[in-house]
């Protein structure tokens, strides 16, 4: 008896493959504008972040072109019988941001009650490094990761520390996430220095509620900034 391994397929990949078939079959013509993010999400029964991640995968594969402020278009390629290989490109950036919102907000609240003066100083140094890094064209966001890692350590919860650092590693290992981050940088989207200052202030005040809100606001802003890469239409 032959058995095949069961593999969980990412939702964005199923969406990307379905749209790719429509483009390669000619149902969506070369150069034609795709339906809006909202319409696609409604028709396919998935979230808008899933649609965005499918679009990132399709753009990386050369099937579509995302024109910021204009929309998403099928490329001018003429396809015969073969369909481009989309392939699993790792966990998407919007899924990672959703998870970070849940984990890092609570980590920040815990840190507010437990953080040391030395760790506050480390955060301020990391913020300074972030400002210096952001002034360079090849900014890698290592200082940003360092900043969030210090907060995780200040929570004094080893499970949280492991999860937060794993999420950042996941982002850097995912072709979908790294490819998208490169595109965001090219569009001039960078981590908010001001958001990080507000997080430090809340932690200095040892106020868990303010710290939680500051982190939530930061990750919400990061998600909104990432979404500006795509067509913006009414919710």
Image: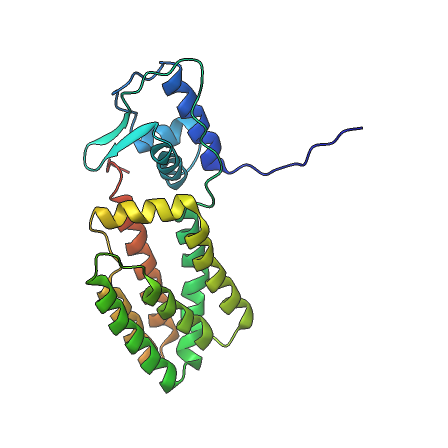
Instruction: Report the residue at 40% width, 58% height from top.
Output: 101
Q: Does the image show residue 152?
A: yes
Quarter-of-image position of residue 51: top left
Note whether 217 is above or below 56 in the view shown.
below
Residue 40 falls left or right of residue 3: left
Quarter-of-image position of residue 129: bottom left
The mark total stands at 0
Q: Locate residue 173, reporting x and y percent.
A: 45, 51
* Foreground pick, 37 / 129: 129
Q: Locate residue 231, reporting x and y percent.
A: 24, 36
* Foreground pick, 188 / 46: 188
* Foreground pick, 198 / 88: 88
Residue 81 falls left or right of residue 64: right
Note whether 173 is above or below 24 in the view shown.
below
Q: Does the image show residue 205?
A: no
Residue that lies at the very extreme toward the bottom in this rendered image: 117
Q: Locate residue 1, reporting x and y percent.
A: 80, 28
Q: Name the quadrant of the C terminus.
A: top left
Q: Locate residue 122, reporting x and y percent.
A: 34, 79
Q: How is the image coloured?
A: rainbow
Residue that lies at the very extreme toward the front in this rendered image: 138
Residue 2 falls left or right of residue 194: right
Note whether 177 is above or below 78 in the view shown.
below
Instruction: Report the residue at 23% width, 52% height from top.
Output: 189
Residue that lies at the very extreme toward the right in this rendered image: 1
Instruction: Report the residue at 46% width, 74% height from top.
Output: 153
Instruction: Report the residue at 33% width, 71% height from top.
Output: 210
Note whether 83 is above or below 179 in the view shown.
above
């Amino acid at each position: 008896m032959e058995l095949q391994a069961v593999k969980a397929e990412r939702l964005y990949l199923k969406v990307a493959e379905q749209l790719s078939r429509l483009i390669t079959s000619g149902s969506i013509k070369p150069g034609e504008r795709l339906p809006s993010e909202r319409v696609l999400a409604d028709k396919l029964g998935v979230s808008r972040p899933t649609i965005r991640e499918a679009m990132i995968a399709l753009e990386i594969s050369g099937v579509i072109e995302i024109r910021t402020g204009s929309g998403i278009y099928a490329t001018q390629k003429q396809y015969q019988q073969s369909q481009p290989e989309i392939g699993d490109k790792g966990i998407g950036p919007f899924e990672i941001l959703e998870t970070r919102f849940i984990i890092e907000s609570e980590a920040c609240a815990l840190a507010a009650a437990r953080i040391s003066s030395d760790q506050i100083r480390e955060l301020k140094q990391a913020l300074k490094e972030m400002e210096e890094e952001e002034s360079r064209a090849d900014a890698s966001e290592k200082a940003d990761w360092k900043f969030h890692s210090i907060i995780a350590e200040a929570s004094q919860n080893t499970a949280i520390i492991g999860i937060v650092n794993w999420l950042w590693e996941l982002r850097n290992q995912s072709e979908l996430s790294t490819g998208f981050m490169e595109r965001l940088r090219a569009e001039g989207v960078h981590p908010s220095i001001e958001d990080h200052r507000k997080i430090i202030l809340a932690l200095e005040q040892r106020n868990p509620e303010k710290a939680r809100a500051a982190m939530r606001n930061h990750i919400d802003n990061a998600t909104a900034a990432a979404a500006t890469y795509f067509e913006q239409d009414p919710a």
